[in-house]
Amino acid sequence: MSGFDFMIVLPAFLAGLLVLATHIPLGAQVLKRGIVFIDLAIAQIAALGVILAGVGDLDPHGWAVQAAAGVAAGLGALLLTWTEKRWPEVQEAQIGVLFILAATAGLLLVAHNPHGGEHLQDLLAGQILWVTYGQLLMPAVGAAVILVLLALFRDRLGRLGFYLVFALAVTASVQLVGVYLVFASLIVPSLAVRHYRAGLKLPLAYLTGIAGYGAGLLLSTVYDLPSGALIVWCLSLTAMAVYAAGPGRTTPARVGAH
């Protein structure tokens, strides 16, 4: 710890803040709508767009790759909108099928690429510790647009609007932090605060996310461990502590109790 330099992890921490800025309010909507695994599906579809761009030899850090990821995620959002209208009773199952199709399509596309396994690993676990300030520009613009949309429309986005905003958020974050952290950032803080009163939920969810990212980056740097995986664990442990410290919950009565 004595030789730790916070400036080394500052770009990664800022990337985490950008992801949390949009994913926490969207996560509350995901839990409310009961479509918890939508982020995994959309994130995996965005990752598939990145893989397709790589097959086309596009610059991995260029705008064309971002556009490919955005188009793929947008098409996935449109497809999920249609399936929810057509078969709403099995929407969660359809989301799972779409996720596995996107994941296996990615495996097939990189099957003959000597660096394909490494590329898939980067998309899943992320390389947040190596994020640069230059990579934060487009996600920052995307986060600002999403926050404005959420502030203006709140619960009036509708099914299609929500899926498209969600696709935009995931597109901007999946290349920064990876699929695993996208899911954890969306769901874990919102789970932690679900029993708190309404006015505390959002601030506490943000504090939970910030603490999880900060602790994960610090520990991964000090102990030379994979940052993405450790942040997921730190987020989850912080969320457990926040949940445990929350207001009392009513215990269901035992069957047969008098």
Image: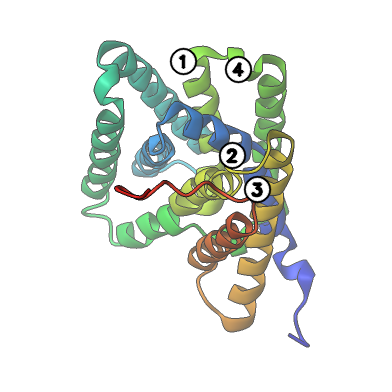
- Rendered residue at 40%/31% (across/down): 35
Tag on residue 23?
Answer: 2
Tag on residue 159?
Answer: 1
Closer to the N terminus: mark 2 or mark 3?
2
In this rendering, position of residue 13 left or right of residue 173:
right
Looking at the image, is 186 positioned above or below residue 34?
below
In this rendering, position of residue 87 left or right of residue 76:
left
Tag on residue 135?
Answer: 3
Image x and y of residue 44, in percent: 37, 41
Image x and y of residue 106, in percent: 28, 45
Looking at the image, is 161 positioned above or below residue 230?
above
The answer for how far apart the CA atoms under marks 2 and 4 are is 15 Å
> Which secondary structure, mark 4?
helix
Residue kind at label 3, given as amino acid type: Gln
Residue 191 in view of the camera: yes
Residue kind at label 4, given as amino acid type: Asp
The answer for how far apart the CA atoms under marks 3 and 1 are is 31 Å
* Colour style of the rendered protein structure: rainbow
Quarter-of-image position of residue 73: top left
> Which secondary structure, mark 1?
helix
Closer to the N terminus: mark 2 or mark 4?
2
The answer for how far apart the CA atoms under marks 3 and 4 are is 31 Å
> Which secondary structure, mark 2?
helix
The answer for how far apart the CA atoms under marks 2 and 3 are is 18 Å
- Give the crowd class for mark 2: few <14, some 14-19, many >=20 residues within 10 Å: many
- Residue at the spot of label 4: 155
Closer to the N terminus: mark 1 or mark 2?
2
In this rendering, position of residue 235 left or right of residue 115:
right
Contact between labelled residues 1 and 3, with CB atoms less than 8 Å apart: no
Residue kind at label 1, given as amino acid type: Arg
Contact between labelled residues 4 and 1, with CB atoms less than 8 Å apart: no
